[in-house]
Image: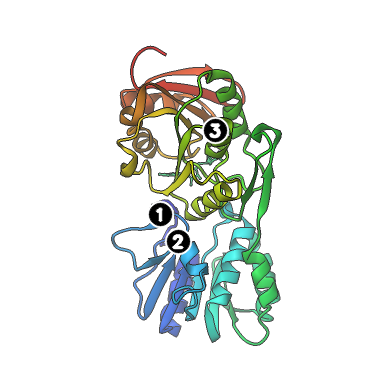
Amino acid sequence: MIDGLNPEDPGWRALVRQLERVAPPSCLWLYSGEPPRPRGELLRAISDLRERSEASVPTVDPAVLDAPDPIGARRFAAAAMWPRAHLGKDFTLAAMARAAMHLEDEGALYLVARKQKGGKSLAAAMDRLFGDVEVVARDKGYHLYRSARTKGLDETLAQSWLSQRYPISDPRLDGLELEAAPGVFSRRGLDRGTAALIDAAREQIEVAPSRVLDLCCGVGPLGLWAAARWPDARVDLVDSHLIAVGLARHNAARLGLEGRAQVHAHDGLDPALFERRYDLALINPPTHAPPEALQALVAPLARVLAPQGRALFVVNRAGRILEALEAAGLRAQTLARGDYAIVSARAGGDD
Ligand SMILES: C[S@@+](CC[C@H](N)C(=O)[O-])C[C@H]1O[C@@H](n2cnc3c(N)ncnc32)[C@H](O)[C@@H]1O
């Protein structure tokens, strides 16, 4: 489970109780973990492929939900969300706006939050967006807020929250400009670890690679930088975060690199790429991934790295990635330790 929600939490209970009480015929459940058993029809909006599970109700990807097609244009009697602070307030505002645009007239958004931990300011945002907000339940510091879609809905504000983008430009990117959006990693600027990995690649890689892998690509800084630096290279970028994948594709197209830079939505390395042989992989892995997840991410590298190919990682501390790489049968060594560690791995032979 990547969302870390606790179904015993009073906030969760208040939200579920309320939905059971009002029993809406259709409900859009947004970015709030595994939903409860639906009474009516429930559609779950997800932002990461890893949120899909066997037991889950049907899911909808961000691009589909925002598209002007029959699914994107669908309206619901209710929408529900339990925002997680680590995703950022801008992501919550965009989700609220998305909910508002998908409600039918008089349909309601239910949002649960701790009043003292951001709840007050989210309620103020609901008030601005819908023109009204009320508290419909309280439980151990949690407030359950409700706003209904009426003529008071500020659609211009909703569109501005939905279309929020951040430019990423940094001298390390050799003039490339990228776009990021709420919910993705390091949306307000190039991550310092990513910058350190670009420096290391510039220094370490003397022969232009012909195939490059950017696993865990986010909005694409490493893979797109590599595609621009080595004009004959073909680059595969992979991420499970669907908003990041959409932005990486958009960035590749904006930079005219889409012919050589292909972006794949996948949890871990896409098996469609297992027959490829990469000369170089540039990887800034998720910082808080548990050891098994890290292991699963790096294991396929043993088969996809070319005999002389290498993977360069940036991490806070080298210990866990070294263990995962060695367990996968790769030969790994730490090249630099500082604020960030740079780790190099090869499928075979000495480094
Ligand atoms: C530290 S960020 C790096 C993003 C980007 N490479 C950069 O440098 O800005 C890690 C990325 O790994 C992605 N990720 C985490 N687990 C993953 C998995 N199992 N499969 C694919 N991508 C994953 C996250 O969505 C996130 O975009």
Q: Is the distance from the Cβ of mark 1 to the nearest ligand 1 atom less than 8 Å?
A: yes
Q: Which of marks 3 and 1 is nearer the N terminus?
A: 1
The residue closer to the viewer here, 313 or 78, is 313
Q: Quadrant of residue 160?
A: bottom right
Alpha carbons under labels 2 and 3: distance apart = 35 Å
Instruction: Please give the residue where the numbered disc 3 appears in the rendered image.
Output: 231
* Residue 114 seen: no
Name the residue: 46% across, 47% down. Answer: 263
Q: Is residue 63 above or below residue 347?
A: below
Amino acid on which the number 2 mark rests in the picture: Ile
Q: State the quadrant of the C terminus.
A: top left
Residue 348 image point, x, y percent = 33, 18
| Label 3 vs label 1, nearer the camera | 3
Alpha carbons under labels 3 and 1: distance apart = 31 Å
Q: Is the distance from the Cβ of mark 2 to the nearest ligand 1 atom less than 8 Å?
A: no
- Pointer 2 local density, CA inside 10 Å: few below 14, some 14–19, many at least 20: many
Amino acid on which the number 1 mark rests in the picture: Leu
Are the residues at dot 2 and dot 1 in contact (C-beta closer than 8 Å)?
yes
Instruction: Please give the residue where the numbered disc 1 appears in the rendered image.
Output: 49
Alpha carbons under labels 2 and 1: distance apart = 7 Å
Residue 209 image point, x, y percent = 47, 26
Q: In which quarter of the image is residue 49?
A: bottom left
| Label 2 vs label 3, nearer the camera | 3
Q: On the picture, is 225 further left or further right than 330?
A: right
The residue closer to the viewer here, 149 or 197, is 197
The dot on residue 207 is: none
Q: On the picture, is 276 further left or further right than 115?
A: left
Q: On the picture, is 292 further left or further right than 234?
A: left
- Pointer 3 local density, CA inside 10 Å: few below 14, some 14–19, many at least 20: few
Q: Is the distance from the Cβ of mark 3 to the nearest ligand 1 atom less than 8 Å?
A: no
Residue 304 image point, x, y percent = 34, 31
Instruction: Please give the residue where the numbered disc 2 appears in the rendered image.
Output: 46
